[in-house]
Image (cartoon, rainbow, N blue to C red):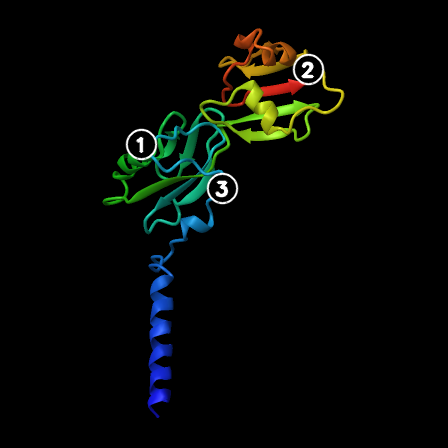
Amino acid sequence: MAACLLLVLSAACWGQNADSGSGGKAAPGETSAASKVPSSRAPSDGTYIIGPDDLLAINVWKEPEISRSIPVRSDGRISLPLIGEVQAAGETPRQLQEEISKKLQSYISEPDVAVIVQEVRSHRFNVLGQVNHPGAYLLTNTTTILDAIAMAGGFKDFAKQKSIYLLRQNADGTQTRLPFNYKDVVKGKKIEQNVRLQPRDTVVVP
């Protein structure tokens, strides 16, 4: 009998621990952010600067009509119900949520706003042409053309390593073409060609 009682008590304790280990329950109408944020989300240290094409999650407590996932337009702005146009590019998530809260105060008493960068799309660069893994890659503050080539898996057999170039988007919509001679750079020559990449740069390997 004592053994049976001990078994029942153990099962009850296990059930309580399982419930407490599952974390706090989401508030009504709230979705767990962790389940939606992909691995390419912005750093959580508050220093990330929002850019065009970034996907934002705007959550306004108890206001499902306003809450939504929305991409930042090419002009750097987003549009929300009630408040209309809001400048997002160039702001941190905290700065943007403060701006949205300020605008909503004319319509909602004490609005509680959260802004999360669900997917980083602006801070990326492209590698195209004769590399093993062409595509888009996440940009860091120190990524150079050499880094980009390495991230893309190196050259294919017939890559023209002396004729590589970088295409850079200018603010006026034009492009700048910067030459990159891999053979020279790896020998320590023309190292000024190994520039740090900027968002939306494209490295082309003919």
Residues at circles 1 and 3 in contact by the CB criterion of under 8 Å: no
Residue 15: percent from left, percent from top: 37, 73
Instruction: Please identify the residue farthest to the bottom as the structure is shown.
Output: 1
Residue identified by numbered label 2: 161
User: The residue tagged with tag 1: helix, strand or loop?
Assistant: helix
Image-based side of 101 in relation to 190, left or right: left
Foreground residue among 121 and 103: 121
What residue is rendered at 33% in x and 81% in y? 9
State the quadrant of the C terminus. Answer: top right
Instruction: Please identify the residue farthest to the top as the structure is shown.
Output: 190
Between discs 1 and 2, the one toward the N terminus: 1
- The residue type indicated by label 2 comes to Gln
State the quadrant of the N terminus. Answer: bottom left
Image-based side of 132 in relation to 139, left or right: right
Between discs 1 and 3, the one toward the N terminus: 3
User: The residue tagged with tag 2: helix, strand or loop?
Assistant: loop
Residue 173: percent from left, percent from top: 54, 15
- The residue type indicated by label 1 comes to Gln
What residue is rendered at 50% in x and 27% in y? 139
Q: Can you say whether 54 is above or below 177 in the image?
A: below
Local crowd size for mark 1, using a 10 Å CA cut-off: few (<14), some (14–19), many (≥20): some
What residue is rendered at 33% in x and 59% in y? 24
- The residue type indicated by label 3 comes to Ser
Q: Can you say whether 135 is above or below 67 in the image?
A: above
Instruction: Please identify the residue farthest to the right as the structure is shown.
Output: 158
Residue 95 is marked as: 1
Q: Quadrant of residue 182?
A: top right
Residue 39 is marked as: 3
Q: Mark 1 vs mark 2: give the one in front.
A: 2
